[in-house]
């Protein structure tokens, strides 16, 4: 699957949320051209530690229906095939359909935030967060004209920082980029051990900030 095709699918997924008539989940599950095999290939070759959380298929169907994203896209396939994905011992948590280790699902976490009502337009989507309380956000038009691009809401500056990445490129960033460089100055000795024991629905809060 070419990168341009994936970007189109992501943009289609965002625009699909503007529909008032919600498609049945059977129309969203693409068994012939799923994006999941491609995502698994990326994970298999990842440089960073990646943990795929167990999926509950009933919850996955409910989450996919709520978010109205096809499984042809990486986002839809992650929602349908995983309870979420943890990066670097759980430092970054990519939202899926929810699991025991990461109870929040992508659609439910966005309700009354980027999504006022399921099936309606999304101005942004909170797709992942980190152990410091930072949010990774997909722009649906509410953060600027760069529709389909990712932002990082930094907990220390409280500013939306454009990353100039699509959702697919954000996955590559999580799987392969030097996260120590991205979080330079914000990781402490023994952070891996501390984060590994942190509930993935909670964060570390520092005052004064690191």
Image: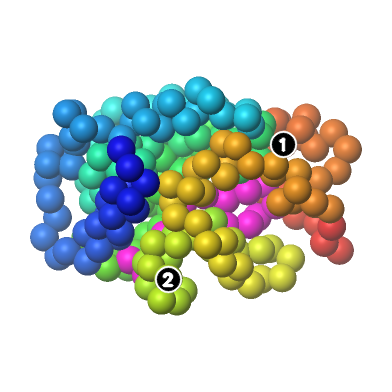
Pick the residue in front: 178 or 85: 178
Q: Quadrant of residue 189?
A: top right
Pick the residue in front: 38 or 92: 38
Residue 195 badge: 1
x, y percent for residue 56 = 34, 27
Structure colour scheme: rainbow
Q: Which residue is mark 2?
A: 146
x, y percent for residue 199 = 63, 37
Quadrant where the N terminus sits is top left
Q: Quadrant of residue 14?
A: bottom left
Q: Which residues are magenta?
A: 122-135
Local crowd at mark 1 within 10 Å, few (<14), some, or many (≥20)? many
Mark 1 secondary-structure assignment:
helix
Residue 27 against residue 153 in the figure, above or below: above
Mark 2 secondary-structure assignment:
loop
Quadrant where the C terminus sits is bottom right
């Amino acid at each position: 699957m070419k990168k341009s095709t994936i970007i189109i699918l992501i943009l289609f997924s965002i625009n699909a949320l503007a529909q008032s008539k919600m498609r049945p989940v059977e129309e969203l599950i693409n068994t012939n051209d799923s994006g999941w095999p491609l995502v698994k290939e990326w994970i298999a070759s990842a440089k960073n530690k990646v943990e795929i959380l167990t999926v509950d298929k009933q919850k996955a169907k409910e989450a996919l229906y709520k978010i109205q994203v096809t499984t042809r896209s990486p986002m839809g396939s992650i929602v349908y095939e995983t309870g979420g994905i943890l990066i670097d011992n759980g430092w970054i948590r990519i939202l899926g359909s929810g699991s025991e280790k990461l109870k929040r699902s992508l659609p439910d976490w966005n309700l009354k935030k980027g999504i006022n009502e399921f099936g309606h337009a999304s101005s942004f989507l909170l797709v992942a967060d980190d152990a410091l309380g930072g949010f990774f956000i997909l722009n649906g038009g509410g953060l600027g004209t760069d529709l389909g691009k990712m932002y990082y809401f930094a907990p220390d500056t409280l500013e939306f920082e454009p990353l100039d990445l699509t959702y697919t490129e954000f996955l590559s960033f999580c799987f392969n980029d030097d996260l120590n460089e991205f979080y330079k100055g914000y990781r402490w000795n023994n952070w891996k051990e501390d984060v590994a024991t942190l509930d993935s629905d909670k964060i570390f809060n520092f005052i004064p900030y690191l």
